[in-house]
Amino acid sequence: MDKVELAGLRPDRVPVFPGGLAIMNAVLSELNIESMLTTGGAMRQGVLYDLLGRFHHRDMRDVTVAQFMQRYHVDALQARRVAVLALSLYRKLAGDPGEPDETAVQRITWAARLHEIGISVAYSGYHKHSAYIINNAEMPGFSNDEQLALSLLVLSHRRSLNKVAKRIDEHDMDWSMVFALRLAALLYRSRADVVLPAVQPRLQGRKLRLTIDSGWLERNPLTVTALADEVREWDKIGFELKVPGLDGLETGVELAA
């Protein structure tokens, strides 16, 4: 092998050349392939492994998300609460009695499971840390576009919408997903298995409407304040969010304070 000289074959690759040649020869023989063309790109075994896993309903992306949850010490119960509610809200917003878009369901689920990984960096602005990790980490099974979309959804789940609105529109993301995830995180802000009232969201164009039991809101003044802030955040990016009865409750909270 020390005497092998082939154009394009680096010296450090010479020792593994016979093994690669044997594998290629066996594959071509087994599959009855008579000829092969080369390409400038690299097909890694991880791509094949990922595609095979998806075909057999063992998605490598689910494995990656579970590993990230463990690595960053995510509160699994809170992640599950947010995921279940966010999916329920999204289905209501979609308004389709059939099965919702599988891609959207997966993305909302992954975002809910990973939206708090940034807390391991710092609680202040943790959604920004979460989004940064998702966008820049090695995430087996995810394409770059998938990581970017997931990162944007996580970044938009709380606080300012003004800073991410343009990017969301540029990537043609579904605002229903953003609204569902934000609302789920807001309603479970206590991080406990609270009994929530019936919640009915609706989205038509750039008009959002949220119907929620006023009696329950009256007993949860911190949620009233959070929803009032949410109304203002959506207004900043040109969306009209209305929560019937919220104005009167917010005034009562301010007077009590």
Image (cartoon, rainbow, N blue to C red):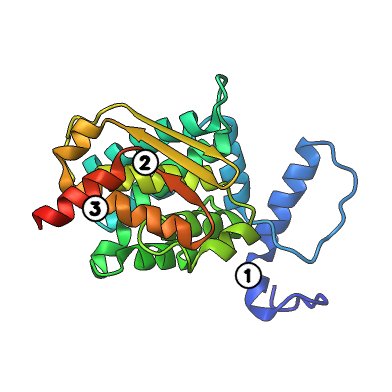
Which quadrant holds the N terminus?
Answer: bottom right
Q: Give residue 225's mark.
A: 3
Q: Nearer the viewer, residue 23 or 243?
A: 243
Which of the numbered marks, if any, corresponds to residue 15?
1
Q: Which residue is mark 2?
A: 243
x, y percent for residue 154: 42, 56
Left or right of 24 in this view: 236 = left
For label 2, the SS is loop
Place of residue 50 in the rendered image (x, y in percent of width and height, measured from the top left): 57, 44
Q: Taking 254 as reference, is 117 left or right?
A: right
Q: Is residue 98 above or below residue 43?
A: above
Q: Earlier in the sequence, mark 1 or mark 3?
A: 1
Q: Position of residue 22 (x, y in %)?
A: 71, 52
Distance of mark 1 from mark 3, alpha carbons?
67 Å
Q: Nearer the viewer, residue 112 or 14?
A: 112
Label 1 close to label 2 by CB (< 8 Å): no
Q: Amino acid at mark 1?
A: Pro
